[in-house]
């Protein structure tokens, strides 16, 4: 049986705009570091599997081109996740991909077993989808590679399932705390420290020496009590 050719797609926003909800806790330089280190953890997880043929990073950041020599870098100046995924999907299809696996750049707890299990669930004319904690999409495997278009954002999980059903595409769900958890808000940083032992992201956050007791204080009129 012929081995499936799967391309992973990881969109990365402009570094100066990424993770803006962490502004109250991390300065711009720290947020840039965090984005790069989370990407490194994701790439490391992929590299420890043998199910992904190519990794495509779509980004407006030309500085990332030398971040990892094994990745394919595609430039996207519009900084729109759906357009970025469409660019990468077109590239994958033209280069013979049987399937594409979308992964966001903010899931540093991702493990090789997660990727392998998602791939094991895939079959012709199907999608495998994983939810994020806010009803979004933290992983999306499409087979064929362009079987549905994407619509990321709030409630994207439901939107992707609707699109699949409309085209009579089989839907499979993969649930994992490693994928459900994405880093968006200050409280998420402490969770990485608690659950991300051995990750580069956890190591970096230790170096930042964030006052997590301050983050846990209840808010009064938008300010810690």
Image (cartoon, helix red, strand yellow):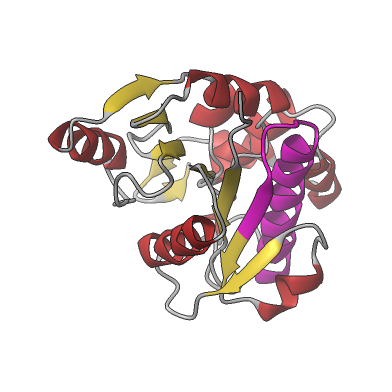
Q: Is residue 101 magenta?
A: no
Residue 27 visible in rendering: no
Quadrant that contains the N terminus: top right
Where residue 111 sits: x, y (%)?
A: 70, 27
Q: Decide: is 184 above or below 61.
A: above
Residue 43 pos. (x, y %): 73, 46
| Residue 205 found in image quarter | top right
* Quadrant of the image occupied by residue 80: bottom left
Q: Viewer-proximal residue, 18 or 141?
A: 141
At x 69%, y 51%, the residue is 39
Q: Looking at the image, which residue is at 66% across and 68% down?
A: 73
Is 25 located above or below residue 49 in the figure? Answer: below
The residue drawn where x is 75% and y is 43% is 41
Looking at the picture, tell me which residue is in the foreground, 25 or 6: 6
> How far across and how far down the image is residue 124, in percent?
39, 29
State the count of labels.
0
Q: Main secondary structure of the magenta part?
A: helix
Report if residue 110 is visible in the image.
yes
Expressed as whole percent of the image width and height from the top left, the position of residue 94 reads 50, 62
Q: Is residue 144 left or right of residue 186?
A: left
Q: Indicate whether 77 appears above or below 210.
A: below
Tell me which residue sits at (42%, 61%) in the image.
81
Q: Is residue 38 magenta?
A: yes
Q: Among all residues in the image, which is located at the extreme front?
A: 1
Q: Which residues are magenta?
A: 28-56
Residue 57 vs residue 205: left or right? left
């Amino acid at each position: 049986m012929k081995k499936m050719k799967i391309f992973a797609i990881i969109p990365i926003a402009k570094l100066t705009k990424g993770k803006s909800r962490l502004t109250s806790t991390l300065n711009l330089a720290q947020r840039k570091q965090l984005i790069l280190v989370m990407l490194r953890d994701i790439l490391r997880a992929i590299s420890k599997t043998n199910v992904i043929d190519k990794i495509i990073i779509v980004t407006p950041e030309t500085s990332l081109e030398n971040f990892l020599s094994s990745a394919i870098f595609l430039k996207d100046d519009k900084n729109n996740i759906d357009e970025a995924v469409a660019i990468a999907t077109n590239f994958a299809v033209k280069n013979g991909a049987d399937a594409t696996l979308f992964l966001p750049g903010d899931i540093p707890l991702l493990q090789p077993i997660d990727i392998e299990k998602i791939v094991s669930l895939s079959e012709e004319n199907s999608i495998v989808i994983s939810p994020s904690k806010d009803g979004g999409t933290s992983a999306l495997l499409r087979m064929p590679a362009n079987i549905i278009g994407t619509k990321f954002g709030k409630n994207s999980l439901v939107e992707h399932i609707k699109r699949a059903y409309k085209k009579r595409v089989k839907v499979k769900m993969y649930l994992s705390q490693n994928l459900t958890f994405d880093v968006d808000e200050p409280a998420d940083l402490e969770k990485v420290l608690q659950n991300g032992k051995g990750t580069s992201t956890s190591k970096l956050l230790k170096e930042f020496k964030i006052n997590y007791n301050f983050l846990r204080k209840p808010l009064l009129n938008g300010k810690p009590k």
